[in-house]
């Protein structure tokens, strides 16, 4: 055997790399150790089971030289197992074998080997191919690490954008709440009511395709903006401690269009529609519509009313009934339920109201959690 020759220099010379040699013949293990040890850290295994055991423990090698014909688990099966395990799937493997048929080499490469060397070996060729695979591994590891970093960075920035969206919605909805301080935690309660209703309806074939988990999350995040338009209602009407006159009520009704138009203007400034505001526009404009067409501002009827707004109608009215206002005392849960039932099929979508009746204990729990001080 010719003396070991150092690999040709490259951008990242892999000297000192860890190599595992797997072969059932002691002479071959000795030969490969003598060839590689002047340049690399070498570990040997005299059968496939031993190699897999070593790979399951401690540090992983940078490269594996693998015989095919071994008792017990052959080299092909060892490679199959390596490629199935996340821990070892990226370790480069060079088959080092006496099997010299084209079909054997094709099978080895198809299983995921990086190279295939037949015995008897030529020392300079083995060293050159080992060095080449180790240099490729340096590049592959760099690219994989970079891809992992970019993926984590994208995830981090996505989470940041979502957090900014959530904060934006909270700030905007809090502006409306601050104008009408008697509504207290109304926006938080209705947010959770809408989510509970949507989750209850998701198992209904009529709504299953519309109420996916992603859609429900968007509804949950958008619901607080249903009354954003109240920022445009004069204080003497919004905070009036008594019944509104017909003229004042007409002004109050404009909070639906004020909210909708505000969101539309914001989107125009961005130059595009924003997914997480789609339901906010629907809810702010249409949550005062009624199933029988007697609501406002457009007089929509039945399923012409967006589903998001029909959900909010139940949530909004329930919360208004159980909450104290300047013009009324709070009703009990039982009274609120009775009033909502009277509006089944006239004010409210019958199917959504039935879902409310089935999960009314959730509404009680939400109201208790976000009770006004």
Image: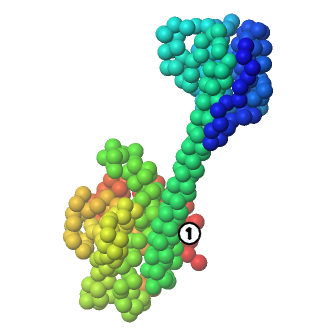
Q: Residue at x 56, y 71 (%)?
A: 371
Q: Name the one closer to the observer, 48 or 10.
A: 10
Q: Position of residue 281 (x, y in %)?
A: 33, 68
Q: Residue at x 62, y 20 (%)?
A: 125
210 horizontally vs 185: left or right: left
Q: Position of residue 19 (x, y in %)?
A: 72, 26
**Disc 1, SS:** loop
Identify whether 372 is placed above or below 333.
below
Identify whether 72 is placed above or below 232.
above
Identify whether 238 is placed above or below 95.
below
Q: Name the one closer to the observer, 97 or 228.
A: 97
Quarter occupied by the N terminus: top right
**Residue 61 in sight:** no
Q: Residue at x 24, y 74 (%)?
A: 297
Q: Residue at x 49, y 15 (%)?
A: 106
How many residues crowd mark 1 within 10 Å: few (<14), some (14–19), many (20+)? some
Q: Position of residue 92 (x, y in %)?
A: 61, 28
202 horizontally vs 95: left or right: left
**Residue 152 in sight:** yes
Q: Residue furthest bottom?
A: 236
Q: Residue 120 falls in which quadrant of the image?
A: top right
Quarter occupied by the C terminus: bottom right
Q: Name the one closer to the observer, 50 or 347.
A: 50
Residue at the spot of label 1: 370
């Amino acid at each position: 055997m010719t003396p070991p020759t150092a690999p040709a220099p490259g951008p990242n010379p892999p000297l000192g790399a860890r190599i595992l040699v797997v072969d059932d013949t002691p002479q071959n293990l000795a030969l490969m150790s003598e060839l590689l040890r002047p340049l690399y850290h070498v570990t040997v295994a005299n059968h496939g089971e031993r190699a897999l055991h070593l790979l399951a423990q401690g540090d992983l090698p940078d490269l594996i030289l693998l015989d095919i014909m071994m008792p017990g688990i052959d080299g092909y099966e060892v490679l199959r197992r390596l490629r199935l395990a996340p821990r070892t799937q990226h370790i480069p493997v060079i088959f080092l074998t006496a099997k010299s048929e084209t079909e054997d080499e094709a099978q080895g490469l198809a299983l995921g080997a990086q190279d295939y060397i037949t015995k008897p070996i030529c020392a300079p060729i083995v060293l050159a191919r080992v060095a080449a695979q180790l240099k490729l591994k340096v590049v592959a590891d760099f690219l994989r690490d970079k891809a992992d970093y970019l993926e984590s960075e994208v995830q981090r920035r996505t989470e940041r954008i979502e957090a900014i969206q959530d904060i934006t919605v909270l700030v905007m909805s809090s502006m409306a709440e601050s104008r009408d301080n008697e509504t207290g935690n109304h926006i938080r309660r209705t947010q959770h009511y809408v989510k509970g209703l949507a989750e209850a309806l998701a198992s209904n074939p009529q709504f299953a395709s519309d109420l996916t988990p992603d859609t429900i999350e968007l509804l949950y995040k958008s619901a607080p903006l249903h009354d954003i338009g109240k920022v445009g209602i004069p204080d003497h009407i919004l905070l009036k401690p008594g019944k509104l006159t017909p003229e004042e009520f007409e002004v109050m009704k404009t909070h639906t269009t004020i909210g909708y138009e505000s969101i539309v203007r914001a989107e125009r400034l961005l130059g595009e529609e924003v997914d997480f505001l789609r339901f906010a526009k629907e809810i702010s404009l249409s949550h005062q519509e009624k199933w029988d067409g007697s609501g406002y501002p457009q007089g929509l009827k039945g399923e012409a009313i967006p589903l998001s707004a029909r959900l909010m109608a139940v949530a909004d009215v329930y919360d208004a009934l159980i909450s104290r206002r300047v013009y009324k005392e709070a009703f009990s849960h039982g009274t609120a339920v009775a009033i909502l039932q009277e509006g089944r099929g006239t004010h409210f979508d019958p199917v959504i109201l039935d879902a409310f009746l089935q999960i009314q204990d959730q509404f009680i729990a939400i109201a208790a959690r976000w009770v006004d001080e």
